[in-house]
Every structure is written in C-alpha cells, then in structure tokens.
C-alpha cells in the first residue's frame, strides 16, 4: 500500500501534507491530510484524529480548522481523513442529496447493497489508515485521541466508546449523538445497514452508553445558534445518558455560535489542549 504525496507546505515549523493511497478496504483511492509538527526529540508524537461532517472532505478542516499553531505548540500530529469513498463506480444517493452517499459515509461499514461494496469507513479509519499512519509518520500510536464535528462527532464518539483502550480522550463539536432518533441518522443508518434497528445501536452514541459502553470523560462544544440543534443534534440526550452512566461529560453551550467552521475554529485550540493534557 504505497502512499502518494499530493501536496506539502510548511506551517508553524511543521509540515502540512495531503496524501493519497489505494485502499484495500474501500476498493477506491482515498485522500487524507496530516500535519506533523517539528520534532523535538527522537520519540514519536501523539496523534489526534479529526473526523469531518456531512459534505466535507479532508480539506475543510485542513483549510479552515485553525489547528496548526496549537498542534505545533503541543507537539500533536493531526490526521484528517475523508468522509466517504469516492470515484468511479461508488454508489451515491439516487437523488443527489447531501446527507447520504458521497461525502456522507457516517463512519459505518455498510451491509446493504449497493453501498456495501465500498462504504467501509469504520474499518478504514479504525484499521487500515492507522496502520498507514504508524508506518509512514513519526507517530506514537500508544497515545491517540479522537475528535470530530457533526457527523464526524458521531463517528469520534462511537469509535472511542467501542475502542476505549485505543483512544485516551474524545471530544466533539456539535455531534449527532443519537442518530437512531434524528432524520440525518435514520436515513443514513437505514440506507447503509438496513431496516433492523438493533444493528444501528453499535453506531449510536447514546445507545452504546445505554448498552454499557464507557469512556471516562467527554468534551463537547455546541453552538446555541446552530440551526440543526433541535432536530438533528439533541445534546440533551447525551447529557442524560452520561449522567445515568456516570460518564464525566463537559457540555459547553456556546451562545451565538452556529454549526460552521467559524464556530469550530474558535474552540479548536481548547480541544487540542484538553487532549494534549491526556496524551
């Protein structure tokens, strides 16, 4: 599995790269970005995974996330994968909707046709891409954190809950916390996993916590002016689940902030410092 550099630029003393490779998991070419700070010693650096939201690629956070200064100061490698497989022959939503298909993989391994052929983002991000990062970059894979936005917040939370020994910390911006109970999630989980709602629970943060999955603590920032807050995000469901399970949830409702990267970039450094303290 060879890695093809797409671009490389210096920033804050480190290297911001974009790379492409042929994925055996998705059966497509996959593109991702990695920021590697200037090395201060011969040891590996901790890794922060960032999972993006609906319609995004690696490029959205890479260009607008404002993470590099903090990562350079804290010595964190920052990895931003794509949100779905892409390319010729990859199934998309029949009506071209933004919330399903290309750009909307929902971080699951699809089991329903025709999406099962390529939409295996869970295995790609939890197995294949970490192996590539460990091989190609100065990463300490014993020190990993994960975070994400919206659909990516859903992915980050579910991956942390199902891999508590791998990720030392988890945080999210405006996450979809209960996809089984909101329109975005119901559409995606039905389309990728079929009608059996019991199969959806493994990809639903609130359901996972209800079923016994645990992490020690979670940090979430949510804009109070987010247009998706009431119908799609419903952070109160996460608050109740964490309270019932004894999980230390820090849920910060930010007045005036929306769902955009203006919101994310405003609190990115806070999240990275929070992760660094636990790595």
Image (tube, rainbow, N blue to C red):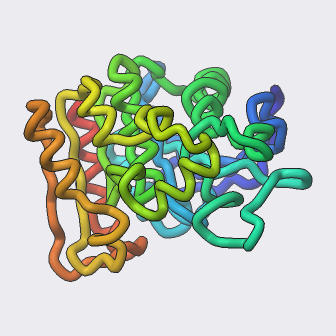
> On the rendered structure, is 46 left or right of 272?
right
Residue shown at the point (37%, 34%) measured from the top left: 145
> Could you tell me if residue 15 is visible in this image?
no
**Could you tell me which residue is drawn at 28 percent across and 39 percent down?**
275
Number of numbered labels in the structure image = 0
Q: Is residue 252 left or right of residue 203?
A: left
Of residues 35 and 189, which is closer to you in this image? 189
The quadrant in which the N terminus is found is: top right
Residue 103 on image: x %, y %: 65, 60
Q: Is residue 42 visible?
A: yes
Q: Residue 235's spot in the image, x, y percent?
A: 23, 58
247 shown above or below 80: above
* Residue at point 60%, 24% (across, down): 127
Q: Viewer-proximal residue, 182 or 131?
A: 182
Q: Of residues 267 and 167, which is closer to you in this image?
A: 167
Left/right placement of residue 120 relative to residue 231 reads: right
Q: Residue at x 85, y 54 (%)?
A: 87
Q: Quadrant of residue 113?
A: top right
Which quarter of the rendered picture does the C terminus lie within?
top left
- Vertical placement of residue 194 versus 253, above or below: above
Query: Which residue in the rendered view is the most extreme toward the right?
Result: 88
- In terms of depth relative to the viewer, which is nearer, 91 or 274? 91
Q: Point out residue 59 in the picture as x, y percentages from the top left corner.
A: 61, 62
Residue 71 locus on image (x, y percent): 39, 47
Of all residues, the one furthest to the front in this rendering is 195
């Amino acid at each position: 599995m060879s890695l093809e550099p797409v671009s490389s630029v210096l920033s804050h003393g480190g290297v911001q790269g974009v790379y492409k490779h042929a994925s055996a998991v998705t059966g497509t070419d996959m593109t991702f970005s990695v920021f590697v700070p200037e090395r201060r010693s011969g040891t590996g650096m901790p890794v922060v995974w960032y999972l993006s939201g609906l319609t995004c690629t690696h490029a959205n956070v890479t260009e607008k996330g404002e993470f590099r200064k903090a990562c350079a100061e804290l010595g964190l490698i920052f990895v931003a994968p794509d949100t779905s497989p892409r390319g010729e022959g990859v199934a998309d939503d029949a009506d071209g909707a933004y919330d399903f298909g290309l750009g909307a993989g929902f971080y699951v391994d699809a089991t329903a046709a025709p999406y099962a052929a390529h939409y295996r983002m869970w295995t790609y991000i939890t197995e294949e891409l970490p192996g590539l990062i460990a091989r190609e970059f100065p990463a300490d894979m014993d020190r990993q954190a994960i975070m994400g936005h919206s659909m990516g917040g859903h992915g980050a939370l579910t991956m942390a809950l199902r891999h508590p020994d791998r990720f030392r910390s988890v945080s999210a911006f405006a996450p979809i916390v209960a996809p089984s109970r909101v329109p975005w999630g119901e559409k995606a989980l039905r389309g990728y996993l079929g009608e059996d709602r019991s199969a959806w629970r493994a990809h639903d943060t609130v359901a996972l916590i209800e079923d016994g999955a645990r992490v020690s603590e979670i940090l979430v920032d949510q804009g109070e002016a987010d247009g998706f807050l009431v119908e799609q995000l419903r952070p109160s469901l996460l608050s109740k689940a964490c309270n019932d399970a004894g999980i230390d949830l820090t849920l910060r409702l930010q007045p005036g902030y929306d769902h955009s990267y203006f919101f994310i970039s405003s609190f990115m450094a806070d999240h990275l410092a929070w992760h660094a303290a636990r790595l």
